[in-house]
Image (tube, rainbow, N blue to C red):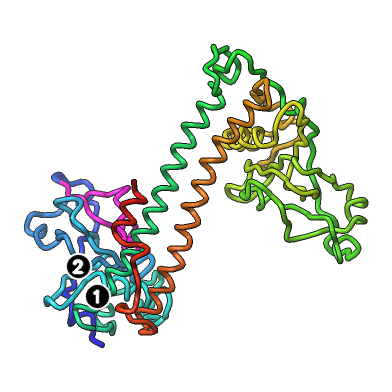
């Protein structure tokens, strides 16, 4: 174990001031918000004027290790030189190796493990109104100093897992972008290359009809039986679905059940499989999300439903279309005249739905959307698994529970990553 200050030269950044903000010949600089764990976020990069006499000592070089003094103290990443001439603010420490037996990325990962998992740096921050990690406290942090070969092997192993996770995250974002473009075309032009007609929603295939949601099927909402009455909950057999389940797209199980007496007394709707559920009230981004019910169930007061006429419209098609109207549904909920955003039955009944004339065409459109969603779920699941793997490896490698030489990284070798990227 060595103090970090014996391994790295620790440099101080430039303090933002009114003069620096208003000056000319500005230099971009990194804030703590730019420094994430093992990642530099360049989405927003600020600038300030730095006097020429100070500038050389305040510039970053590729390979510098950056550590946050404030914010999430200790958060660290490597600067890779994406911007040729860039500085850093005083709330970020710049660390440069003092010898050739130091792999900076190893120390990124050790700091991450120490601050987020092991708690060994608990109390490392100064006790002020805003916690911060001063230069002296950072320099005094005791860190391991294994051989340079071990440092590099551990850093390579962890970075490979992290890169694989980031790759799947990027693929998920690109799939989302693709889906937005594809669904817009599907629900405006269809799949049959028909001549278009103008409607209140814009161009639609000539054979399609615009039908109010209220004419497609029965619309209603649920409620919540008295939680204090055990007659309604103890030994319940009827699945009771809440708005948080709308992210599932298809609902086959429930974590809570009500009794038949609860259904009767609370006048809960007993919905058949194929009902399309909508989060009509919800926290955060829940409001407006939809799912298809695949079992007989009832719902909470935060969930609305459409029990569609399946001779007219397929539940899969209706859910896929309503998903494209997510932002519009949230706008309608916010403009309902109430202080609380909610989708009322009156609002839902008036929503126009473009309906292809045949169930076959509806099934084809829903099938395209479903294939994109399946691909997204696959990559999202892989990203989650890799994040869990990284967390476990980080802990076990940094505590010596496993040795890096014993790992088989072939499953996520560089070639595999390139194949996934393609």
At which x and y percent is residue 45? 27, 49
Q: Which residues are magenta?
A: 26-48
x and y percent of residue 77 in the render? Answer: 28, 64
Query: What residue is disc 2 on?
Result: 12
Q: Position of residue 112 (x, y in %)?
A: 36, 72
Instruction: State the quadrant of the N terminus.
Output: bottom left
**Alpha-carbon distance for marks 1 and 2?**
8 Å
Give the camera-side residue of 404 and 26: 404
Left or right: 199, with 386 as reference point: right
Q: Residue at x 57, y 40 (%)?
A: 370
Q: Which residue is mark 1?
A: 135
Q: Would you call the spot at circle 2 few (<14 residues within 10 Å), some (14-19), or many (20 or more)?
A: some
Task: Determine contact: label 1, label 2, CB under 8 Å.
Answer: yes
Question: Is residue 27 highlighted in magenta?
Answer: yes
Tag 1's secondary structure? Answer: helix
Q: Residue at x 41, y 53 (%)?
A: 168
């Amino acid at each position: 174990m060595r103090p970090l200050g014996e391994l790295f030269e620790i440099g101080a950044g430039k303090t933002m001031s009114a003069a620096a903000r208003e000056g000319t010949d500005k230099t971009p600089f990194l804030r703590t918000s730019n420094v994430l764990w093992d990642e530099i976020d360049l989405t927003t990069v600020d600038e300030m004027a730095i006097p020429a006499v100070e500038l050389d000592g305040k510039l970053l070089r590729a390979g510098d290790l950056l550590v946050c003094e404030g914010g999430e103290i200790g958060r660290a990443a490597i600067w890779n030189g994406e911007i040729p001439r860039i500085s850093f603010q005083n709330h970020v420490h710049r660390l440069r190796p003092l010898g050739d037996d130091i792999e900076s990325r190893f120390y990124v990962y050790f700091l991450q493990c120490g601050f987020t998992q092991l708690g060994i740096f608990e109390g490392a921050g100064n006790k002020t109104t805003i916690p911060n990690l001063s230069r002296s406290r950072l320099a005094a942090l005791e860190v391991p100093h294994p051989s340079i070969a071990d440092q590099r092997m551990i850093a390579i192993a962890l970075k490979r897992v992290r890169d694989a996770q980031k790759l799947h995250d990027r693929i998920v974002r690109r799939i989302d972008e693709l889906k937005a473009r594809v669904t817009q075309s599907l629900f405006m032009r269809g799949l049959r290359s028909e001549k278009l007609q103008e409607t209140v929603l814009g161009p639609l295939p000539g054979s399609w009809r615009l039908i109010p949601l209220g004419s497609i099927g029965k619309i209603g909402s649920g409620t919540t039986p008295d939680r204090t009455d055990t007659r309604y909950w103890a030994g319940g057999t009827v699945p009771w679905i809440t708005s948080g389940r709308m992210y599932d797209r298809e609902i086959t199980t429930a974590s809570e059940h009500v009794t038949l007496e609860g259904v009767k007394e609370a006048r809960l709707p007993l919905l058949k499989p194929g009902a399309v559920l909508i989060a009509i009230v919800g926290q955060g981004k829940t409001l407006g999300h939809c799912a298809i019910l695949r079992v007989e169930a009832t719902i909470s007061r935060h969930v609305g439903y459409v029990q569609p006429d399946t001779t007219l419209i397929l539940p899969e098609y209706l859910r896929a279309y309503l998903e494209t109207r997510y932002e519009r549904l949230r706008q309608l909920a916010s403009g309902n005249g109430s202080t609380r955003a909610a989708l009322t039955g009156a609002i839902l009944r008036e929503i126009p739905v473009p309906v292809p004339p045949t169930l076959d065409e509806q099934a084809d459109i829903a099938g395209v959307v479903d294939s994109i969603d399946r691909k997204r779920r696959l990559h999202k699941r892989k990203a989650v698994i890799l994040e869990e793997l990284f967390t476990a490896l980080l802990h076990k490698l940094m505590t010596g529970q496993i040795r890096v030489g014993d790992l088989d990284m072939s499953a996520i070798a560089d070639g595999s990553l390139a194949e996934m990227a393609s």
